[in-house]
Every structure is written in C-alpha cells, then in structure tokens.
Amino acid sequence: MPGTVLAPEALRVVNYAHRGASGLAPENTMAAFEAAATHGAHVVELDVRRTADGHLVVMHDPSPARTTNVAELFPERAEAPVSDFTLAELRRLDAGGWRDPRHAGERIPTFDEAMDLFAQRDLRVLLEVKAPGEYPGIAEQIVAELRSAYAGWLSGRMIVQSFDWEFMRALRSLLPRIPVGLLGAPDVAQLSAYAGFVDHVNPPRSAATAEYVESVHQWGMAVNVWTVDDPAEMSRLIANGVDGIITNRPDLLHATFAVA
Ligand code: G3P
Ligand code: CA
C-alpha cells in the first residue's frame, strides 16, 4: 500500500508539519520544529536554500525579507536573496519576532542544526529543496552532508521533494534509498513516466480529487496534500484517499483524526 514507509498505524493519514508547526510558531525555525514534535506531527517539512558562502540554511522564501528583520540590519539589502548573504550575516537576523514577540531571538537554522534536532528527537523529515537550479551542486552537497553525519539514521526517516521534477530524478540516482516526492500534480497521462523513480506525488489541495488520488495509487505512489489547516477539509481529503496531509496545524490534524 502506498505511503506505508512513514505511516504510523495509529493515524489514518501521516501528519506532516509544514515548515514545522508554522501555525503555532515562526515557520522554519527550531521553535516550529520543536512545536511539531510536541503537537502530534509525525514528519517535519522544511525548506533549504544556500548562502553566499556555501552553507545550507532553512528558509522558504527566496529572500529573508518577509520572515526576518533584515530591513533593520541590512537596509541596503532589504530585498536581496538568501544567496547574497553569508551565513554569519543571516545568523544575526531575528527570524521569530515578526511573528510574535514571544519568539524574538529565533535564528535562521542551518540545515545541520535542524538535522541534529531531528536525529536527537527521532523526528522524520520531509526535505524540500527550493529552486535547485539557482544553487549549482546543491544535490551533491546535500548528499555529502547527509552521508557524513546522518547515514546511520536516515533509513525510513526522510523523503526529499522539490517542484523541480528533473532535479528529483537526478537526486534519486545519487540517493537511491531515500524516497522521492514531486511537488505539484503531474498529468495522469504522465504518471507512468514518473513512477519509475518517484514514491510520493504531493499536490496542492485543489488537485487531490478522489479520481486523481486513485490514479496515483494505481502507479504505486503515495499522495500527500498541502497545505490543509481546516479540519473539514482534512476530512474531505482523507475521504478522497490521501496518504498524508501537510499542515501548519499538526495539532488540529492529530486531535481530529488520531484514533486509539
Ligand atoms: O510541502 C508542501 C509545500 O511546502 C509546498 O509549498 O511553498 O510551502 O514550500 P511551499
Ligand atoms: Ca515547502
């Protein structure tokens, strides 16, 4: 059955915390990852990009403008991309105060820092590689970092996904034992072409009809839908047969759909 790699028996769907529990804490911060762990998530989703000096960091947007105080510290680069900043510069930014003063002082995590937490807490990971075409060699870099520090821990605990499907094909060949996810909704006619290297098709909620989910399942792939925070919609999508729900509110998914 699709999705069983990460599916706990106690829940009808896998509970993926989107950018951590980002409905409860500032997205893609250690606070959001800790909140995911304590509010029922089974898997933590996070986004990675790369700094000017070659470090992998956890950030959704192309620029730190929306989720940090970069405009205060670097007004001349207020809208500049992550790749214009060194790691030391990014680490000076406050990545929590924009969301809630309680979270002031949160820092942009490095990928290694986040991975260390996941390994310590034995949290499973849905790793999204953002805009890989903008970061030459990022596939090899991710593979090297995973192999050097987490090789003994990764098996059955990580999925890698991207909106760039050809990048995922290349990554699969570098990391043959790590499941691959495609973000988006390939046409039903295209599914056979992807089934050879893809384990998860992760569409937006509007695309996850019962018919589409069934088509993906027929090719042996799981369906994890994003981003769903309304329990009524969670219920509808579960009825459509999805294997996982990617949510900012893992607490609501857990409270509503966990079974004894
Ligand atoms: O994991 C699904 C979701 O993260 C994809 O969209 O923009 O939130 O990265 P986005
Ligand atoms: Ca993401």
Image (tube, rainbow, N blue to C red):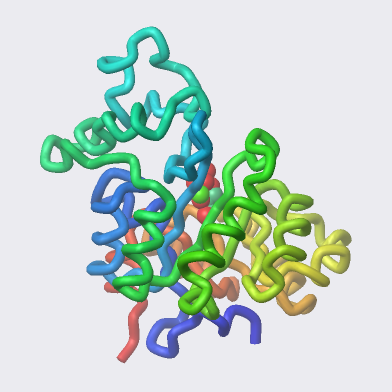
- Name which residue lies at 57% across and 84% down: 4
* Residue 238 at least partly seen: no
Above or below, 153 relative to 233: below
Q: How many marks?
A: 0
Above or below, 132 relative to 206: above
* Residue 230 at least partly seen: yes
* Residue at the extreme left: 102
Above or below, 111 relative to 158: above
Q: Position of residue 242 (x, y in %)?
A: 57, 71
Q: Position of residue 232 (x, y in %)?
A: 40, 63
Q: Position of residue 40 (x, y in %)?
A: 30, 72
* Residue at the extreme top: 76
- Name which residue lies at 71% across and 56% down: 168
- Name which residue lies at 52% across and 73% down: 151
Between 230 and 74, the one nearer to me in the picture: 74
Above or below, 15 relative to 132: below
Q: In the drawing, does residue 171 fall left or right of residue 27?
A: right
Q: Quadrant of residue 1?
A: bottom right
Image quadrant containing the C terminus:
bottom left
- Name which residue lies at 43% across and 51% down: 111
